[in-house]
Image (spheres, rainbow, N blue to C red):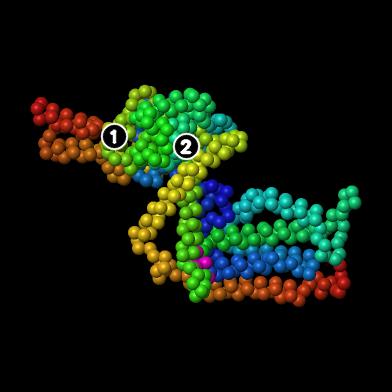
Amino acid sequence: MPIVFSNVFHCYNPKSPYSFNALNDINMTIDEGKFIAIVGRTGSGKTTLVQHMNALLKPTQGKVEINGYVNSSNKKERTKKIGGLRQEVGMVFQFPEYQLFEETVLKDVAFGPKNFGATKEEAEEAAKAAMARVGLDESFYERSPFQLSGGEKRKVAIAGILAMNPKILVVDEPTAGLDPQASKDTMNLFKEILASGTTIILVSHDMDIVSEYADEVIVMENGKVAKQCTPEELFGVSLSEYSLDNPHTYKFAEELRKKGLNIPTTSLKNVDELAKAIKENIHG
Amino acid sequence: MASFALGKYIPYKTPIHRMDPRVKVLGMIFLMVAVFFSYSTFSMTFSVMGAIALFIIVIMIISKTSFLKLLRSLKSLWFMIIFLLIIYVVVPKNDVTEMHVAFAIKGYNFYWESFLDAARILLRLVLMIGLSMVLTATTSPLDLTYALEWYMTPLKVIGFPAHIIAMTISLALRFIPTILEDVNRIMKAQTSRGVDFEHGGFGKKIKAIISLIIPLFVSAFIRSDELANAMECRGYDPNGKRTKYRKMHFKWSDALALVVVAAILGGCIYMKVINFDLFNILLGEGAVL
């Protein structure tokens, strides 16, 4: 099931001096089973946008339809028990490690499934499976989440969402503050989750990540969708007007082209592909 | 977070907003004291309170303080109000010489005076909340602490740590919105994990609150630690002498406002002291209302 936004507006603190229109008339469809990246400058409405996808925020106007759930400003249209939507759309917040609270890691990861009606055994089963997916072994089960390192905490928090088996996974800046290896591991984890049939929606500033992983990019600007296209279509156009930068591989390839090397630029997803293209160009 | 109406600064640009915070603090205290007097008769008390209420309403209109928010903050006090009313009505005061029976149930008398007493208390409460709302809605927390610090300065002579107290207050005030933001963020994160903060029985509510409180404490401790370090790094010394970036200016309009408020308080004290009764003078000696 796709996610459909129809004429969605969102205003924070309406009717006060702090009133702020975060979303202005959003109309778009996000397809199932894809890796979608949402990019845009700080304050462009990315986080507000994704929080409508699991009904944490209610539109001030318009509606969002997800898997038969309707998150609408209109009370009659709005699905009554919208809480169930949150199991289908898992949301990993920015710095998710600040939501941990149980005494043990296992209990914390099992917290989500238990809230959605799983028995203790089922929840622990799901928790163990989720922890295996993010690469936390049995030695972590009985440890306190507060004694872990930052990277491990984040893994626990992500496992806590994965344990609910969401059909759509929304991740807000998952690599912020992680070291390069940890962020690579995290992104590869999302790639695996995508391969198992889950839609991934990633909010990010990092164009290298977008170029390597995303099937589709949504560019947000002043609460509007400025562009919805593939990464290849996006790179090369003037990205600076959205406060965005081209990925490093693109910039590198562009410089090489100026020196006379005939290699593609926008279709290169990562360093390996760039290296391959250069090699073929030299030998071929 | 809309329920935190009381105590939230709203940055309009009105004459009340521009007033010197020191004058606002003192003015509020004067008016509150004036509200607390009761006079020789109920009719006098209510007339004077009515006049003060009118004055406060005018201030609220000028400062664009919302009446809706005042009503909303009363809504959260409804239990206390009902409780007060019952106590006042059921337990009549003995010090009033003349009591007028309103009605009697099974030989137990209910007096008009008790109802009037309850109404007086209620009016006082509303006026006090209104006053403090005007102060906090028109004065930024920082200005408020500056004003408090200024009033505490004379105490420095006896070794009172005025600056440290003011710094503590301003840090506490500064962190209220930050902590509210944290509450909001953690609530959203836990809601995403299936916690329902609005519905569910007692046990579920407790569990929901725990899932909020523990991360909140953790982040509050981290924040305070970071803040302390940041202050140290910038050479903060609690006992050091410092100048101010923003100076408070006492203007002519402030003096005028202070005179008006002081006159109101003075008038009230005078009427109280001489047992002034306007209705007695107007209607002649011995008239009963």
Q: Is residue B147 magenta?
A: yes
The residue tagged 1 is A184
Q: Residue at x 81, y 58 (%)?
A: B92
In the image, B189 versus A12, the foreground residue is: B189
Quadrant where the C terminus of chain A lies? top left
Residue visible at 59% across and 73% down in the picture: B258
x 82%, y 65%: residue? B95
Q: Quadrant of the N terminus of chain A?
A: top left
> Does the magenta run of residues contain B229?
no
Taking depth in this image into account, of B187 and A262 the one nearest to the observer is B187
The answer to the question of whether label 1 and label 2 lie on touching residues, with beta carbons closer than 8 A, is no
Q: Is residue A31 left or right of residue B9?
A: left
Magenta span: helix, strand or loop, mainly?
A: helix
Amino acid type indicated by mark 1: Lys
Crowd tier of the residue under label 1, counting other residues whose Cα lies within 10 Å: few below 14, some 14–19, many 20 or above: some
Callout 2, which amino acid?
Glu
Residue A182 is left or right of residue A166, and the answer is left
Q: Is residue A59 visible?
A: no
**Drawn side of residue B247 relative to residue A176, left or right:** right
Lower sequence index among marks 1 and 2: 2
Q: Which residue is mark 2?
A: A102
Distance between the alpha carbons at the discs numbered 1 and 2:
28 Å
User: Which segment is the magenta one?
Assistant: B145-151
A234 w.r.t. A199: above or below: below
Q: Chain of mark 1?
A: A
Q: Is residue A208 left or right of residue B31?
A: left
* Disc 2 secondary structure class: loop
Q: Quadrant of residue A131?
A: top left
> Foreground: B249 or A31?
B249
Q: Chain of mark 2?
A: A
Q: Secondary structure at mark 1?
A: helix
